[in-house]
Amino acid sequence: MTSESVDILVALRRQLEEALRKPKEKRRWVMVIDLKKCVGCNACTISCKAENILPPNVTYRPVLEEHLEENNRIGRRFLPRPCMQCDNPPCVRVCPVKATWKQADGIVVIDYNKCIGCRYCLTACPYGARSFDFGEYYTDQTPQFMPYENAPSWEYGERWVRQKNRSPVGNARKCHFCLHRVENGLLPACVSSCIGRATYFGDADGNTLVSQLIVSPRVMRLKEHLGTEPRVYYLL
Amino acid sequence: MKQKIWPWAIIIIALAIGSYGLYSRLFSGHLAENYGNYVTWGIWVSAYLYFISISVGSFLVGSVIKQTKRLSRLVALATCIGGLLAIWLDLGHMERFYRALISPNFSSPMAWLVWLYTLYFIVLVWTNYVNFRKGEDEKSGVTSIGIVLVLAVILSSSSLFALSIAKPLWNTAVLPLLFLGVAIASGAASLAILTSMLWPEDKTLLITLKRVILYSLLLTAFLEFSEIFLAAKSGIPEHYEAARSLLAGRYAWPFWLGVVVLAFILPTVLLLPLQSTGTKTVGGYISLLIGLFFLRFLFLVPPQSVTSLKGLENAVMEPRYSYSYFPSIGEWLVTVFLCGLVIAVVLAGLYKFKYLGLAGEKNKEAKISV
C-alpha cells in the first residue's frame, strides 16, 4: 500500500471540493454505479431515506433486483435506481407551472412551493423515479407518533418540516443527488453509505474519476433509445 | 317534459353519499385514495377525461345540428364543471392551480389545457347566459370561437398522453382522432337522451343524432382496436404487456364487458334500425355512456400498470409502489358526487328551458325543417 492509496470516498470527496471551486455552470455532476460491486444491501436506499427524512411511499433510490435463470443456474442482479438527472428530461417538459427545471450543474430540481401536485411528471418519467408525497407517516397509526418524522429535511438547501397541506406534502419528490450535501462539500448519502463502494459521484468535466469511468467500454445508461441522456452511468 | 321527483331524489342521494368522499378529500388530502407512484392517475382523471369528452362533443354536435344548440351548451357547461372539478380535486395543491395561468410552461400540454379551458369556460358561460337570460341564440362568431377551442382542447388533451414517451399505448398518433370519436359519440349520446325526453316526437332530429352516434362509434371502435392491435403486434414488451392486460390480463373483464359489450356492441344492437325510437334506443345511449366511461378508465390505467424497468415492481415494498389499482371508496364517492352534480346542473337548466317554452319552439323549428 503506497502513501498515495486512499479510500475511494476520500478521493471522491477531494475531487468534489475541487469541483466546488469552479462556478456552478462549469460543474457537470454525474453518478456512476458499478453493478459488479453492488451487493444489493439497500444501504443506499436507507441512508437516502434517513438523510432526506422521507415518509412512507416516497423512496428516491430503490435497488432493483433481477432474478436470472438459465440452464438450471440461478443468478441475481442488482440495479440501484436514483433519478437519472436527464439532460433531456421529460419531467421538466411536462410540468405545467415551471416547478421543475434543470440547473446549470445538471441537477433536475423541484421547487416544492410552486409544484401543484398534478403528478404529470410522475407519468412522464420513463424510469419511475418520481414519487408523490401523500402526507403519510410511519408512526401515525401507532400508540406514539415519533418526533423524528417531523424533523426537518434540508433538501435544496431549505428547511422542510412536513405538515398537513404544506409542501413537500402534496408535491412530486425525487432524488437530487443530495444537492444540499454536495454544495457543502459532502458526497451524496447513497455514495457515502455504499458498503461495496459501488457508487461514484463527481464532476464529469476535468480530470476526475467519474470522467474516466463514463468513457469505459463497460458503461451503459438506462433507456438511452428514448433520447433522455441520463447522467447516471452503469458499469456492467 | 313532465316534472318528476325521482331524478331529483337520485341526484340528492348521489350528492349526499358522494359528499362524504368530498369531505374526506378536502380534509384528509390524498390519504384515502388508492392511486400511487406508478398508477398515478386514477378514476378522477378518468372522470375528468370523460366529462370533458361529453362537453366538447356536445358543443361540436350542437354547433352542427342547430336544433340541439341550446341544449348542447347546457350539457357542455354542466359536464365541463364536472370535469374541471374532478381534475382540481386530483391536484396535490388545489390552492395553487392559478399558477398554471400566471406562470405557465407552454412546453407542457397541461398548461395549454389550463388556458384553453379558461377560454372555453368563458364561452360556455356566455353562450348559456345569452340562451337562458336573453332567450337568444349565440352569435355565429362565438360559435366559431367555441369550435376552434373545442378542437384545440381535443388535440391538447390527446397530446397530453400521446407525447409521453414513458407509457405504452399512449404514445401513438391515433389518439387525437380517438379522442374526437369518443367526444362526438358521448356528446351526441347525451344530447340524444335529452332530446328523447324533451322532443320524443321529433323523429328527424333523433335519427340524425343516432346517425352521428353510430358513425362516431364506428370510428372510435376502429381506432381503439387499431391502437390495441398495433401494441399487441409491435413486439415491444411494454406495449405488448399493456395490450395483453386488456385482452387477456387483469383488465380483461372490464375491457370485454365494459368497452366491447357496453360501448360498442349493445348500443349498435339497440340503436338499429335507424328509425326505431323509445326506451330501447335510450337504453342504447345509456349503455354507450357507461361503456365510454370504461373506455376512458381503461385508456388511462393499464398503460400505467406496466413496469417501466424490470425489477421495479418489487423494488419497494410499500403499498403505493404498486402496479395494480382499484379506486378506493373515497374515489368512488367523489365520482358519484360529480355525476350527481352534472346531472343536477343539466336538470336545473332543463327546468329553465321549460320556463322559456323552448321545447315548443324546437318542435316548431323541427316541423318547419321537415
Image (cartoon, coloured by chain):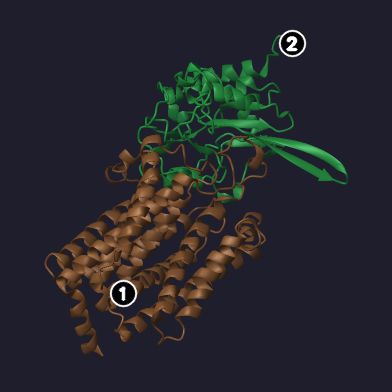
Chain colours: A green, B brown
Please name the residue that numbered disc 1 is placed on.
B197
Residue type for callout 2:
Thr
Residue A208 makes an appearance in the image: no
Give the vertical position of B119 relative to A8 (above or below).
below
- Viewport quadrant of the C terminus of chain B: bottom left
Circle 2 residue: A2
State whether residue B289 is above or below residue B198: above
Q: Is residue A15 visible?
A: yes
The single residue placed furthest to the top in the displayed view is A3
Looking at the rendered structure, whether the residues under marks 1 and 2 are on a common chain is answered as no
Q: Is residue B96 left or right of residue A119?
A: left
Residue visible at 46% across and 52% down in the picture:
B43
Q: Secondary structure at mark 1?
A: helix
B42 displayed left or right of B334: right
Describe residue B228's horizontal placement relative to residue B280 as left or right: right
Seen from the viewer's position, the closer of residues A38 and B210 is B210
Disc 1: CA contacts within 10 A as few (<14), some (14-19) or many (>=20): some
Which residue appears at 13% of the width and 70% of the height?
B135
Residue B293: image x %, image y %? Answer: 46, 61
Q: As rendered, which of A61 and A8 lies closer to the eye?
A: A61
What residue is drawn where x is 33% and y is 52%? B84
Q: Residue furthest front?
A: B5
